[in-house]
Image (tube, rainbow, N blue to C red):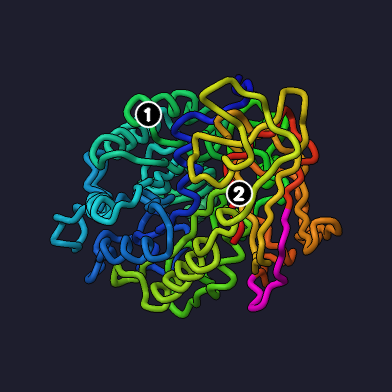
Amino acid sequence: DAPAPIPPLPSEAQVAWHQLETYAFIHFGPNTFGDREWGYGDAPLESFNPTRLDCEQWARTVKAAGMKGIILTAKHHDGFCLWPTKQTDYCVRNTPYKGGKGDVVGELAAACRKYGLHLGLYLSPWDRHQAFYGTPLYVEYFYAQLQELLTQYGELFEVWFDGANGGDGYYGGKGGKRNIDRSTYYDVPNLRDTVHKVCPDCVLWGVGGESRWIGNEEGWAGETNWSPEEYLYAPEKNGMYGNMDGWYWQPGESDAKMTTGGWFWHSGEGQLSAERLFQMYLETVGRNATLILNCPPDKSGSLPAATVERLKEMGKMLTERLQGTNYAKEATVTANETRSAGTGRNFNAENVCNGDSATYWATNDGVNKGTITFAWDEAKPIRYVVLQEHIQLGQRVKAFSIETSNDGTKWTKRGGNIATTTIGYKRIIPLNGSTSNSYEANPQKVKYLRVNILDSRACPTIENIELR
Ligand code: FUL
């Protein structure tokens, strides 16, 4: 008697990936020392010389920020490898770092294990160092490097294959431009299989992957944001929004910077305010995307003190604002529509606040709308409504609204002009309608709050509602 799933559906690995919600991006390498964003591929090996590289400090900070993992640039476009790869000499083994005995990927993997964080790796397909870039030999080289990363560092939750490609570079001293056919050169279907053969739980990010670029680097997703997507190989077309009729479960990941400079560290750069980072969280995680927030270590190899402070502040804000009292748990919860069920299970409204992600509220087949109402004896100071669909059955909701009342008869629509369309894995609506100024010291108190599902691709299946 459970609702039938409506495709596309997420894989188990994708469900686990959604649940991470936010993780850090770490860009580090010769660019850090050479004040570059896109190294040409000729930076001298001696230039990579961090004297206080401390992956545990990265991990501790990321953890304090409330993030669940770290993705490191194991190799950026300059071709330099942060691990002692067997495939090239252009790597950490031939630098002054730890007298050539260092392995930044290995050190980060150990730190992530210690702090309970998930590890992901960025391996740039474009390589401006290798002379044979652009030939079939390079593709073999790229796959061999990938194999090392997939097998030597434990479970990876995500591999990141950047889309930047071709153009000029050092190319073993030959220089000039190399152009490749992006749609065929890396044999993406084979790449996907290669990753899953070794790491079945790993999500492949990028063109042809299982997570799509959100289409901007500013830290926001569309208010309407479907995980279904139609262009598997051109996610930039619908980046911010996805497509309800798409065949692929290819949810958005939003890559953004917490500093004012580039992806790599540059002297004199600043950090965004914690309030701005919180806004980004609301506009990404709160709009059915994940947030990968870049925080670059400096030349010493550690995160600058100001970065550490800012990330801690962000973590504190997330905890205080979104993990404090959940007023939904104190409410009387009712629904005007509830799915009939046989004995031993139910689809009741209370399921949305019982803390069990296996249970959800649903309506009967053919009933694509319904209202859940929360009522309290005393009015409550609520600022945020957090909604989650049971995505294992597909993303369904097309339109909803939130209303509050103080007498149960006169209702006011809340959330300002925010488009209350999709929900997906997670949607967060600030009741005051502002993502940049969402936290009011003295919010309007409410005695009744209702969530109206107004339209859905099939009967709605709502797993969780939090009122904060
Ligand atoms: C881009 C790259 O070209 C940048 O250098 C950076 O790594 C960013 C996250 O992705 O496409």
Q: Residue at the spot x=41%, y=28% of the render?
A: 136
Under 8 Å from ligand 1: the CB of mark 2?
A: no
Q: Which label lies toward us, 2 or 1?
A: 2
Q: Position of residue 162 (x, y in %)?
A: 49, 45
* Residue 158 in picture, x, y percent from top left: 42, 41
Picture layout, residue 467 above or below residue 307? above
Specify which label sits upstream in the sequence, 2 or 1: 1
Q: Is residue 303 left or right of residue 96?
A: right
Residue 161 in picture, x, y percent from top left? 47, 41
Relative horizontal placement of residue 386, taking residue 105 as reference (left or right): right
Residue receiving disc 2? 465
**What type is the residue that disc 1 sits on?**
Pro
Does residue 148 appear in the picture of this structure?
A: yes
Magenta-drawn stretch contains 441: yes
Residue 208 on the magenta span: no
State the image coordinates of residue 443 (x, y, percent, origin top left).
68, 73
Secondary structure under tag 2 reads strand
The residue lying at 45 percent from left, 43 percent from top is: 160
Q: Which residue is mark 1?
A: 200
Please name whichever residue, 333 or 4, is drawn nearer the observer in this view of the structure. Answer: 333
